[in-house]
Image: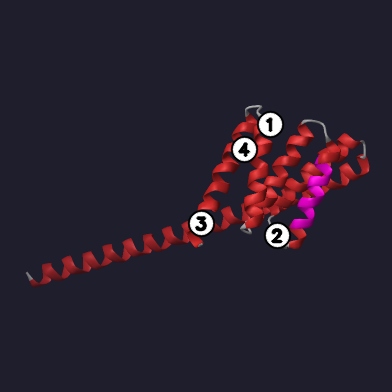
Amino acid sequence: AENRKKEKRYLVVAYSAYAHYLEENGKVDSALAFYDKIETIAKNINLNKQYISALHGKANIYIKREKPQTALSILQKAEKEIKKFQIDDIDMLRSLHQLYGTTYKQLGDFRSSLTHFEKYLAYNDSLLNKNTQKAINELEIKYKTAEKEHALQLQKIKLEKERQEKQRREG
């Protein structure tokens, strides 16, 4: 049973990559079919983020086709699932609000569009801050590591000098 679930996880990853490829190459009907497959498989084996990503992919296609009402119902379903699964993925929430903003713009609901684009920007800033903090932390670690390596090298040099000095005195 666990092997079968693992196979399905790999299948979801492969289908996702292929759906994106199809979408980027203008084969949106085929991409939509793969997003449907991903949605079904991911939901059945509790791959919640992949399930929601499939919904985002489908909504994006309907936005491109200028079918905002269909996109809106898919986005509402995605939002409901995000809340249900208590997903706190900044990138996923950012994407959701960007898609909502575009959908409401197509519907002519500019107030709602603005609200969602503002949320998108807030998540975007949050993601940028998170990435910036991560980069700062990585640089601090590299600096401290280099500092310790330098101190270690100095200690080795000092010990080598002391050893040579001792040899000269004894020899």
| Circle 3 Cα neighbour tier, 10 Å, few/some/many (<14 / 14–19 / ≥20) | few
Measure how far apart labels 4 and 1 are at the Cα level. Answer: 8 Å
Q: Nearer the viewer's eye, disc 1 or disc 2?
A: 1
**In front: 131, or 139?**
131
Which stretch did the figure color magenta? Answer: 71-81
Question: Tags 3 and 4 in contact by the CB under 8 Å rule?
Answer: no
The amino acid on which the numbered mark 4 sits, given as a three-letter code, is: Ala
Measure how far apart labels 1 and 2 are at the Cα level. Answer: 28 Å
Left or right side of 105 for 43: left
The amino acid on which the numbered mark 1 sits, given as a three-letter code, is: Val
Q: Nearer the viewer's eye, disc 4 or disc 2?
A: 4
Mark 4 lies on residue: 19
Mark 3 lies on residue: 4
- 153 part of magenta stretch: no
Measure how far apart labels 2 and 3 are at the Cα level. Answer: 25 Å
Mark 1 lies on residue: 28
Left or right side of 165 for 140: right
Left or right side of 106 for 9: left
Q: Secondary structure at mark 1?
A: helix
Can you name the residue that lies furthest to the front here?
1
Q: Nearer the viewer's eye, disc 3 or disc 4?
A: 3
Residue 77 vs 60, above or below: the answer is: below
Mark 2 lies on residue: 87
**In front: 146, or 39?**
39
Residue 120 showing in the rendered view: yes
Q: Secondary structure at mark 3?
A: helix
Q: Position of residue 93 (x, y in %)?
A: 74, 52
Q: Secondary structure at mark 2?
A: loop
Q: Quick one: label 1 or label 2, which is nearer the N terminus?
A: 1
Main SS class of the magenta portion in the image? helix
Q: Residue at x 52, y 49 (%)?
A: 10
Q: Nearer the viewer's eye, disc 2 or disc 3?
A: 3
